[in-house]
Structures are given as C-alpha cells and as structure tokens.
Amino acid sequence: MMISFLVLIFFLLQVGPLWAARYELTRNNIEDPNKIDAQEVSLYRVKLGDPEEKAIEYLVEDKISGIRVEQEGTFILLWNKGNPTGAMAGVGLMDGKVNLIFINNRFAYKTRGLFRRVLNAKSTKEVRELLGKEDYGDENVMGAMLHYETKGFVVNYLGRDINVEFQLP
C-alpha cells in the first residue's frame, strides 16, 4: 500500500506540469516578462496547439461565469455578458488545432499578472517598460504593432484599444 502511494506521488510530480500551462491568463500572477512564452500561455485551460475538441469542450461547453461564448467560423469568441460591445478574448482554429489566442483591453478585468498591466497601459512606452524592447515594431500616428517574436506574441496598441495575440512560431 505504501509503495503504491509513493509511486502515485512520483507519477503526479512527473506529469503535474503537463496538466496546466505555466501562465493561465485568468489565474496566474506572473509579472516577469522573461517567464512568458506563448507556448506556455493558456486561456481557460486552452493552449496553443491544443486540439479543436479541447477548445470546444473548455470554452463552449463549460460554463464560464459572466461570459458568453460564440463559435463563428474558425474562431471561438468570448464576450462579456454585462457589456457585450465586442469580443474580449478568444482562440483561432486551423487544421483542427488552436493556432491563436487573443485578448484585448475589455478582458483586462479577468486577466491576471503582467498582461493585465499591458492591457491597461496608457502608451507604447509603458508597454515597453513592462515587456522590454520588442524584437521589431511598426509605430505610426494610428498606433503601434510591437512584435515579441521570440516569445510568440504581438501587442497591437491603438490608443485606447490594446490587443495581444499569442501564436506558435
């Protein structure tokens, strides 16, 4: 009995990290930009590369408090039930897998950690202070696209509207 218990503990310690992403956008309070990698980010337990069935199960079939979910074409969109002015987060599906996770400033109230501060940033300078210098960017009078390609995400800064897109390399 004791040996089987120890084997179970050992097994759980080995596979435990596989159960959850390192940075669950709605739960983990990671503040260090060096610990962020798109492959380790999840939205309500859905990660990049997950099968479409898992995304549908966790986002569409499970009930998420205060959120209305719609599947439109190749996207699963999350809307705030109290203020449905636009999708606040979602995932993109291609070839039966999740290939995109996106969040925007309407999702800031649900987001934890570093990206909550990014979604509430008042300038591109503030975004750079939070995340560090981008790999490359495009800034003009309309806004900016800050590409953090090595980490697998892009920040679209359009004044009051901020979007973050996580993609596999």
Image: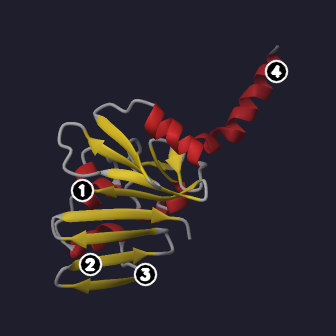
Q: Secondary structure at mark 2?
A: strand
The amino acid on which the numbered mark 3 sits, given as a three-letter code, is Asp
Q: Residue at x 58, y 42 (%)?
A: 53
Q: Which residue is disc 2 drawn over? A: 144
- Could you say where residue 74 lies in the image, as x and y percent from the top left? 47, 55
- Which circle's residue, 2 or 1, is located before the other in the chain? 1
Q: Tell me if residue 23 comes above or below residue 66 in the rendering.
A: below
Whole-angstrom CA distance, mark 2 to mark 1, is: 15 Å
The amino acid on which the numbered mark 1 sits, given as a three-letter code, is Asn
The amino acid on which the numbered mark 2 sits, given as a three-letter code, is Ala
Q: Which residue is disc 3 drawn over? A: 135
Q: Which residue is disc 1 drawn over? A: 105
Front tag of 2 and 3:
2
The amino acid on which the numbered mark 4 sits, given as a three-letter code, is Ser
Q: Residue at x 57, y 48 (%)?
A: 52
- Tags 3 and 4 touching, CB below 8 Å: no
Marker disc for residue 4: 4
Whole-angstrom CA distance, mark 2 to mark 4, is: 56 Å
Q: Tell me if residue 31 comes above or below residue 64 in the rendering.
A: below
